[in-house]
Amino acid sequence: MNARVEISGHHRNALCHSVSVNMRLISGTLRSTPLPWLPVLSNVEPPAIRRKAATDKVVEKIVKHDS
């Protein structure tokens, strides 16, 4: 099951900026740090992995509830 939620461009950009700022704060890095390295340095899983884990958890909960 692959449920995808679309976010408008403005909201997506604001969310990405907010996530980047917070990961820089957590990791203590400077603005020159490339964005792809921020999740690694701040020990935060990338959004795609977190979304998949959350979706799997919800699906598991539904399956348990139905049986």
Image (cartoon, helix red, strand yellow):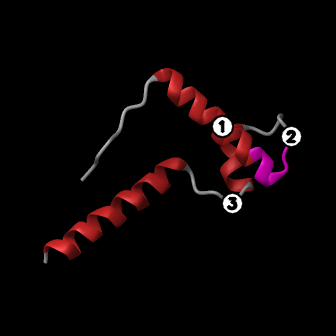
Of residues 13 and 2, the one nearer the viewer is 13
| CB atoms of marks 3 and 2 within 8 Å | no
Disc 3 on helix, strand or loop?
A: loop
Q: Position of residue 11 (x, y in %)?
A: 51, 27
The amino acid sitting under disc 1 is Ser
Which disc number belongs to residue 43? 3
Q: Nearer the viewer, mark 1 or mark 3?
A: 1
In the image, the segment drawn in magenta is 24-29
Which disc number belongs to residue 30? 2
The amino acid sitting under disc 3 is Asn
Label whose residue precedes the other's in the sequence (2 or 1): 1
Label whose residue precedes the other's in the sequence (3 or 2): 2
Q: Position of residue 4 (x, y in %)?
A: 33, 41
Which disc number belongs to residue 18? 1
Query: How far is mark 1 from mark 3, CA to CA?
Result: 17 Å
Q: Badge 1: how crowded within 10 Å, few (<14), some, or many (20+)?
A: few
Is 10 within the magenta? no
